[in-house]
Image (spheres, coloured by chain):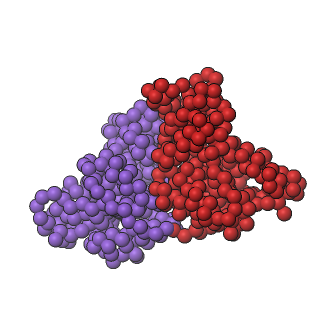
Chain colours: A red, B purple
Amino acid sequence: MAPTIGVFDSGFGGLTVLRALIERLPRARFAFLGDTARLPYGSKSRRTIARYAAQSAQFLVREQGAEFLVIACNTASALALDAIQQAVPVPVLGVIEPGAAAARAASRTGDVLVVATEATVRSHAYAAACGTHGLRAIEKACPLLVPLVEEGWIDHPVTVEVIDIYLNELRAEAAAHNMNPDTLVLGCTHYPLLRRLFEGAVRPGAKVIDSAESVAVAAVELFNGRAAPTTSGVAGETEVHCFATDSVEKFERLGSRFLGRPVGHVELIDLGG
Amino acid sequence: MAPTIGVFDSGFGGLTVLRALIERLPRARFAFLGDTARLPYGSKSRRTIARYAAQSAQFLVREQGAEFLVIACNTASALALDAIQQAVPVPVLGVIEPGAAAARAASRTGDVLVVATEATVRSHAYAAACGTHGLRAIEKACPLLVPLVEEGWIDHPVTVEVIDIYLNELRAEAAAHNMNPDTLVLGCTHYPLLRRLFEGAVRPGAKVIDSAESVAVAAVELFNGRAAPTTSGVAGETEVHCFATDSVEKFERLGSRFLGRPVGHVELIDLGG
């Protein structure tokens, strides 16, 4: 049997990470959990996020036999990676560090912009991770973008305008710090759906880093040093099992936008609380 | 001692209801609970919302001695009023029925528009309540408006544009049903902060009903048939105690916008989950 990779998010935005993982590890078995009863994590405290994320990780490992966890949630990666690593006995990969490493590879000026949720920005996890790579980062919370994506306005003039407003504020702040940013990190799993709009809004030559893609690349590297599921699984369709703690209907309806294909049946589970 | 009125919301939007209550019952004692650890209720299932709301109501009655509850949350009023009434032994007033009654008083054509959260609309609670008053109602979920209010864009061109888009869609749907609406019900406690924008966006002569105000008026009527706290309390400042299950800092920071004055200290409580 192919190794099981557990993928966890507070909602279904993390399906963009699952999509990037499936493209690279088509023969692995995937168990995806969206803790939709308790989303959004982005506006909650560190203590609460850590408790929710640890429970979710334990479900994937204990109930689904995950041998490896990808935390496809920027907020949980920023605020609860330690708590998750303590809660389960398998390797855990968060989304922040791969995003920062990709920014390091992309940036020539060493100055980067980061857009993310409120809690991710408040944690300054991207700024810290960028700092360890010798980058300077300015972060900005963009709380309107998740609702715009979920409303389906992913190619809408209002969304273009909102992104322009956020990026102008961010660039003004960078200029005030005498920074010369040439790279933009999309630090939320909903934002890859707005990638084209972001690419149209950054200055010519600036790079847009999708942290969903970055963590998938990092997961493949980690895997290839281990069980190499890219070649050990059986041929055919990737095995994907989706679980949610609430709103299964919404997950099934909107999830395909993020996964790039139908999500199929989503099983409702109860983590309590 | 003045009677205690418990006011409950999933977040701090219900402070617009508390504000309307304080204006009318300045001598009552108020205990407000925002279940901020588990918001937004608007995207969750009926079962989950009922469980959360019942726990919150029990806190206000058992721990805070509330003799009367106002459910200042459209979603909980729409989906969990029965569950709350079963969970506590005091009178419980929801926000839906007073909003529908006010629409009945305002409308001459008998056709009304309702804007609310996704779960409130999905429940069709406003349409049902309007129906019992002989009104026809068309409802629309406007999921971008809460984030726009919380971002502080309450007088922003983007918000004007989003409201225009939503209302145009709503009017087109009404026209397709051969309806002639002359009244708009704001079915979410965040929306009173956008009241001026809504008033600018409806057709000339159309009325805008604020369900926060409507429930306060209904509460005063109910009270005056009971303990009449408008006259029984001591003179001076209204006594207001605020509680939240998470994100106390955000509550304190944003709450004053909704309450129209500083919210003061917000006490963090744990309802489990």
Where residue A230 sits: x, y (%)?
83, 51
The residue at the point 69 percent across, 69 percent down is: A63
Q: Is residue B29 above or below residue B254?
A: below
**Is residue A74 something one can see in this rendering?**
yes
Q: Residue furthest right?
A: A235
- Residue A75, given in percent of the width and then of the height, sits at 55, 50
Residue occupying the far left of the picture = B235
* A49 in relation to A179, above or below: below
Compared with B18, B146 (above or below) is above
> B213 or B11: nearer the eye?
B11
Left or right relative to A212: residue B207:
left
Decide which of B4, B185 is in the foreground and name it.
Answer: B4
Q: Is residue A142 above or below residue A6?
A: above
Q: Nearer the viewer, residue B191 or A13?
A: A13
- Please indicate, yes or no, whether residue A196 appears anywhere in the rendered image: no
Q: Tell me if A261 is positioned left or right of A52 in this view.
A: right
The residue at the point 55 percent across, 50 percent down is A78
Residue B68's quadrant in the figure? Answer: bottom left
Picture quarter containing residue B208?
A: top left
Residue at 49% x, 68% y: name it. Answer: B273
Quadrant holding the N terminus of chain B: bottom left
Q: Position of residue B221 (x, y in %)?
A: 22, 63
Label count reads 0
Instruction: Name, please, the residue furthest toward the bottom.
Output: B89
Which residue is drawn at the image coordinates 49% and 31% (left, top)? A170
Q: Position of residue A197 (x, y in %)?
A: 60, 32
Relative to residue A240, is residue A131 drawn left or right?
A: left
